[in-house]
Image (cartoon, helix red, strand yellow):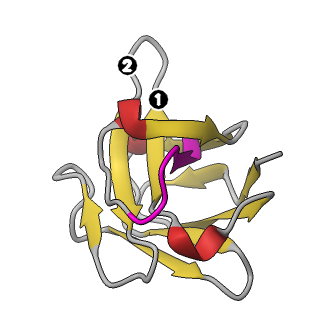
Amino acid sequence: QVQLVESGGGLVEAGDSLRLSCAASGLAFSIYTMGWFRQAPGKEREFVAAISWSGGRTDTADSVKGRFTVSRDNAKNTVYLQMNSLKPEDTAVYYCAVPSVGGVYYVLASAYKYWGQGTQVTVSS
């Protein structure tokens, strides 16, 4: 059974940093693209970042480009999202996710099958 557990969220001030972690189990972690998504109140879930199975390819949404960095440690079955220069508009529940197929790079939420429970990030102005 695939399990994804996010951690690292919290309440911070604008300009602060946070690092989210997502620990995965129940899958061959090193062959899967991993994605980060977020959902703010009253808004649809949106793509934040993705990283390929080897870490050789990453993508970040334009809204977070230059501020957020995705990375992974395949030895620890963990993916990270380093968030710097946080803004109030980054306030959301952040989810990590795994697609249904390994060895393929995805950024669309519809391709992701397994989702964590989410971690709340709140940025005050």
Query: Is 98 in the magenta?
Result: yes
Q: Is residue 12 left or right of residue 108?
A: right
Q: Main secondary structure of the magenta part?
A: strand
Which quarter of the rendering shows the N terminus?
A: top right
- Which of the labelled discs sits on residue 44, or is there none? 2
Name the residue furthest bottom: 75
Quick one: 39 or 96, which is closer to the camera?
96
* Foreground residue among 56 and 6: 56
Give the residue at x 80% y 57%. Answer: 26
Residue 91 in sight: no
Report crowding for label 2: few under 14, some 14 to 19, many 20 or more residues within 10 A (C-alpha).
few
Residue type of the residue flagged with mark 1: Gln
Location of mark 1 (residue):
39
Which region of the structure is painted magenta?
91-103
Circles 1 and 2 in contact, beta carbons < 8 Å:
yes
The reply, left or right, for residue 65 in relation to residue 41 is left
Mark 1 is surrounded, within 10 Å at the Cα level, by few (under 14), some (14 to 19) or many (20 or more) other residues, namely some
> Where is residue 18, by image quadrant?
bottom right
Q: Position of residue 71 (x, y in %)?
A: 47, 78
* Of the pair 3 and 82, the residue shown nearer to us: 3
Q: Residue 87, relative to residue 28: is it above or below? A: above
